[in-house]
Amino acid sequence: MDIMARLCFTLLVLSSSSSSSSRSMVAMAEIVTHVFGDSLTDVGNNNYLQYSLAKSNYAWYGVDYAGGQPTGRFSNGRTIGDIISEKLGIQSPPPYLSLSPNDDAFLKGINFASGGAGILNDTGLYFIQRLSFDDQINNFNKTKQIMKAKVGQEAANKLCNEALYFIGIGSNDYVNNYLQPFLADGQQYTHDEFVELLISTLDQQLTGLYELGARKIVFHGLGPLGCIPSQRVKSKKGECLKRVNEWVTEFNTRVQNLIHTLNRRLPNAKLAFADTYPVVLDLINNPTTYGFKVSNTSCCNVDTSIGGLCLPNSKLCSNRRDYVFWDAFHPSDAANVVLADKFFSSFFSSAPAAAPAPAH
Ligand SMILES: *[C@@H]1O[C@H](CO)[C@@H](O)[C@H](O)[C@H]1NC(C)=O
Ligand SMILES: *[C@@H]1O[C@H](CO)[C@@H](O)[C@H](O)[C@H]1NC(C)=O
Ligand SMILES: *[C@@H]1O[C@H](CO)[C@@H](O)[C@H](O)[C@H]1NC(C)=O
């Protein structure tokens, strides 16, 4: 069995054990997922960073979330991670910074993601505060210490080995670093040098997570960043930036090679690459196939190359389900549903539909 098939098999077993008919406490306790990433997966960590400018805890964020209130998610509704958790029949893991050491979440799965974060420390530096991928891994390291204190070293190791790790990071290394002409990295490095820096850093980071016990890791590749509204506005006629998409494709290919190398280098590692690029591109190119009307501009009409977050005084589109993009960077809740469905069915293909009703 190749790595991918093995991972799918593992996930399949996990997902079928969570199907409603056998949702015993034991089965529930088995699916532990940890999430690492940026604003595509942040569920509120940045709300706890006093000086961070990468925040979304104000209207209109959350307008389509349960209760209609902002939560720190960078969307009008749910993240892809929220929707996948619903499908797995588990709670969406809570933000790391919301937890106190007594919290159950230390044994059940945590979300470490932070808006504005990147693979590199200096990515998103103008947001003042965000948890870089290194910071997130350090926080997982602290989590492991807490787990050990709770259940002992052996059980903590086992929990870490059996958990699923979802990672989506790298978009900001482009959008809020390399593609910003006033920052050093875009001037200092050719793209070949920059992608080399990203990949060698990611190699150390994934190896660090492995050393902390992570085995089943799904890395989400980058989407076609050249087609997000904040990039399109830089072109003459609002089209996708071809060069940016070529760079992103290069990054994705290099990550796939890295994952292949790590699976050979690290005993029992089961890393997999989730190729989001073609899925997102198809959604953008053929919005009507998926029930959308607009994919070249955002519902909250704030398309600029810097800024681009929805603001309380922004004007929203009349039907939020018609738009693939919520703001200049982030997909709408409706688009996240499509993307989560595609991702879920490619990883959990022949599993019974383990999709209990949303908890809200
Ligand atoms: C980030 O900064 C820390 C502390 O200065 C350093 O140890 C680490 O190697 C840096 N990581 C990256 C990805 O630059
Ligand atoms: C985790 O923390 C310990 C103790 O602070 C440190 O020795 C170790 O290098 C850290 N591991 C990783 C992978 O960051
Ligand atoms: C989006 O596409 C539509 C239809 O092709 C076009 O009329 C409109 O001008 C485009 N909007 C932007 C912001 O590029």
Image (cartoon, helix red, strand yellow):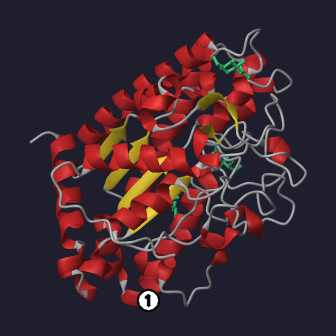
* Residue at x 28%, y 75% (from the top left corner): 30
Residue 209 sits in quarter: bottom left
- Name the residue nearer the viewer: 333 or 11: 333
Residue 17 sits in quarter: bottom left
Residue 301 sits in quarter: top right
Residue lying furthest left: 1
The spot of residue 23 in percent (x, y) is 24, 81
Q: Is residue 212 visible?
A: no
Residue lying furthest top: 236
Quadrant for ligand 3? top right
Residue lying furthest front: 318
Using the image, determine if residue 79 lies above or below residue 225.
below
- Name the residue nearer the viewer: 334 or 119: 334
- Name the residue nearer the viewer: 30 or 346: 346
Left/right placement of residue 317 relative to residue 296 reads: right
* Residue at x 25%, y 72% (from the top left corner): 18
Tally of numbered discs: 1
Q: Residues within 10 Å of mark 1 (few under 14, many from 20)?
A: some
The kind of secondary structure element at disc 1 is helix
Image quadrant holding the N terminus, namely: top left
The spot of residue 348 in percent (x, y) is 24, 52
Amino acid type at mark 1:
Lys
Q: Return the residue at label 1.
A: 150
* Residue at x 72%, y 36% (from the top left corner): 328
Using the image, determine if residue 276 lies above or below residue 312.
above
Using the image, determine if residue 148 lies above or below residue 297.
below
The spot of residue 73 in percent (x, y) is 66, 59
